[in-house]
Amino acid sequence: MSTQLTTPTNRQAAEALARSKGEPNWLVELRGESADLAGTLGWPKPEKVRIERWNLTAVGSYEQPTAVSGINELPEVVRELITEGTENLLVQRNSGIVWNQFSSDYASKGVIFTDLETACKEHGDLVQKYLFQAVAKDEDKLTALQAALWNGGVFIYVPKNVEVELPLQAIFYNDQAEATFAPHILIVADSNSRVTYVDCVVSEPGAASAPFVHPSIVEVFVKPGAHVRFSSIHHIGETGVDMSIRRSVIENDGRMEWIIGDLNDGNTLSDTKSILKGTGSTSDAKVISVGKNAQQNSLTTQAVHFGKSSDSNMVTRAVMKDSASAIINGITKIEKGATKANGVQTEKVLMLSPKARGDANPILLIDEDDVTAGHAASVGQVNPEQVYYLMSRGISKQDAERLIIYGFLAPVVSEIPVEAVRGQLQRLLERKLEG
Amino acid sequence: MATHFVIEGLKAAIEGKEILKGINLEIKGGEIHAIMGPNGTGKSTLASALMGHPKYEVTEGTALLDGEDILEMGVDERALAGLFLAMQYPSEIPGVTNSDFLRSALNARLGEGNEISLIKFIRKMESKMKELEMNPEFAHRYLNEGFSGGEKKRNEILQMMLLDPKIVVLDEIDSGLDIDALRIVSQGVNAMRSEDRGFLIITHYQRLLNYITPDFVHVMMQGRIVKSGGPELAERLENEGYDWVKEELGIVDETVGQA
């Protein structure tokens, strides 16, 4: 069947799988409809990157997860990512959750931190209200496919006025390319609450050596006055394709902070969007990326302003080695009526080889007069004058370039508020830059 | 062993155009040499060629520092051999803090296994910054980024003090400095005078030499040293300009490599 080649699922298969996992009817239905949609919709079409040439259909098949009885049973690639002493940790291996730990202190305050599959069963009404409401299942083939296939994942609910001080952490890892690996993350921060969530997506080198796809969706709902910090580092091996769609809906005086580290070794589509719905809502997005070999990266940040006096800031910095390419899109959209809104964006690419390619496309779409907006973009190579200056102080060429590259990324790395994440990012950055 | 730096027959070109037409100069530890001359006579090219700026091609000659030809070395090796150039236009390097940079440079100088501890380094850096009347905040600022002209020059001198070089070349260190900064920078240089260290001061104006007294003064024209003397030569140049030198030597156009 030719449809099987372009759409690796269908209604019957999706529904049968959902039923076999004991999912509620509304979810079974959602998956069935989505599978149908996936058969008819087209892939997303990012600027200047032909993702249809990527291996997008290697979504594999569901693999029943086996829980581990302790963190020490997890592989090294996962253990090194675990924040020391954490009490709030979810680990997904391939198609499902294998470790779930949550502090009873937070649970007693009504905070929910569990995998999304479990949440659909135990908190169905709450989840149903939000799931696929920030990202619609029928936007394109990717969202439809993800809706049909998603597994494991995370659900966070923080009740009104509750502050979760310690970061909630999740790690998603793939050690079997044939298994469907499609986490969906749903975060709901109720009025005046506060939460920090950090995750990492990795694959076991060697074990996941066949082509696979990681279609993932993040939806964050920031209720009035709430503050959500979201940080995500992706470090998937070169046979993996990462397709990650992130979206946040921010209400009055809410604040959303994104920190994204796209450090995969394979092709990457990363799209992070804040919808500033409420008056006084604010959003800050920081993205860094390092590309090597022939890797292609499509990195998009977006801010859509509906709310009056809403404020957005987006910064993307990418370093491209070898013949890697990064197409960086920044889209600031200010809707009519969003008076006194302010949107600022910066995209910069540093190319370390003559074959590397970088493209920065700042786009401002403004339908309101009473606003401020700004953008800056640059694409360039390591400046030989800078290398000369550092070398003239006895620093070797290699170290000089290293300092310049880290300096280029520093404005993003140094502002990461969670120390553990900053450390992880630095370590992975080093590995990727020097590897 | 006392420092000994000998430049012999140095010729250098930029983009195929010869600028230095055979420079000969000998600097011993403890000596201060000044090179003066109008604009466009090759003074800064001499500094850049010695340090190994990628745009300049050395076509002939040697520059022996304690017997080793630095012109055969990479830029970093020249620095490690003991050459220091305080630049006229230091680069700005965003994202790299001044203190991280200084520590990397100092550790490169000290060599693997002899790295300075962080505490010792900070103490050392802070005391030198104090001598130069630099705001301590400059340690945490990105290297030269947003520094004023005078702040950049002080930062160059700070590096010189930390790196303890054998031969110091100061390229127009006085340009863009107000009197206060000039005094501080000169004090920094004078504090570094020692029997093991030689200085080559490239300057346009005599005023710097009121603060730092040279042992030898050289005049550069047409890519060569055309006249040498003692401090009195600088004074005469300040009072009478360069025309008498040109007349004496029969030079009509003193510049070199100008379009």
Image (cartoon, rainbow, N blue to C red):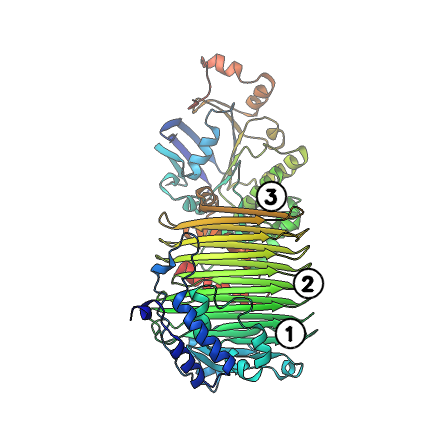
Which is closer to the viewer, label 2 or label 1? 2
Disc on res. B146: 3
Residue at horizontal 65 percent and vertical 50 percent from the top = B136
Could you give the CA–CA distance between mark 2 and mark 1, rounded to whole angstroms? Answer: 20 Å
Q: Quadrant of residue A169?
A: bottom right
Query: Given the image, on which type of amino acid does mark 2 rest?
Result: Asn
Near mark 3 (Cα within 10 A), the count class, few <14, some 14-19 or many ≥20, is few
Query: Alpha carbon of mark 2 to alpha carbon of mark 3: how far?
Result: 37 Å
The subunit letter for the residue under badge 2 reads A
Disc on res. A164: 1
Residue drawn at point x = 64 percent, y = 48 percent: A368
Q: Is residue A299 above or below residue A147?
A: above
Which quarter of the figure has residue B154? top right
Q: Is residue A397 visible?
A: no
Would residue A3 appear left or right of B161 to someone viewing this image?
Answer: left
Where residue A252 is drawn, which disc sits there? 2
Tag 3's secondary structure? loop
Q: Residues within 10 Å of mark 2 (few under 14, many from 20)?
A: many
Please tell me which residue is depicted at 47% across the width and 53% down the height of the picture: A328
Q: Measuring from the top left, give residue A418's x and y in whole percent.
A: 59, 66
